[in-house]
Amino acid sequence: MKRDFDLIRDILISVERHEEAILWVSDVDWDESGVSYGFGDAIRRAHFDLMKEAGLVADCFHNAGQNQQTYGYRLTWAGYDYLDAIKDEDIWQKTKASVVANGGSVAFEVMKSIAVGFAKQKFSQYTGFELS
């Protein structure tokens, strides 16, 4: 399986849009943005696990009785910060284009730094304040 940053972004957006603090995996509307990845639940679950390892989400369990558990996630502070950096479509497209132009694959921290750099640049253009 390849890590899919578009899927990760879409999942983060779905978690943030959810009315409750916890997004139960069974509640995810994968076609909400009109994008259909065709991924099975195993791929989505694996990406949730990757996001957990990166500190973007925390997992939550709910015992539904008779040895059944419902599995869900909530955004962490770091998850909200990363989402704030990549939520803007223009920033996201520039970030992805920069990665492609430089070999097509980068570490998560590099991807995050690129997005934050573009977000700072956009903020500076609107306010005149330079952010370091």
Image (spheres, helix red, strand yellow):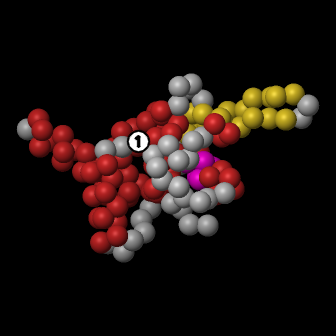
Judge left or right: residue 64 versus residue 37. right
Residue ranking furthest to the right: 66
Q: Which of 58 and 87 is in front in this view?
A: 87
Residue 121 x, y percent position in the rendering = 18, 47
The residue indicated by pointer 1 is 83
* Identity of the residue drawn at 46% across and 41% down: 13
Residue 62 x, y percent position in the rendering = 75, 29
Residue 120 x, y percent position in the rendering = 22, 44
Q: What element carries label 1?
A: helix
Residue ranking furthest to the top: 20
The magenta segment: 47-51
* Identity of the residue drawn at 33% across and 53% down: 92
Judge left or right: residue 75 versus residue 73. left
Q: In which quarter of the image is residue 61?
A: top right
Indicate the amino acid at tag 1.
Answer: Leu
Residue 124 x, y percent position in the rendering = 14, 41
Whether the magenta-drawn stretch holds residue 94 is answered as no
Q: Which of 31 and 76 is in front in this view?
A: 31
* Identity of the residue drawn at 42% across and 69% down: 105
Q: In which quarter of the image is the N terminus?
A: bottom right
* Identity of the residue drawn at 30% across and 64% down: 97
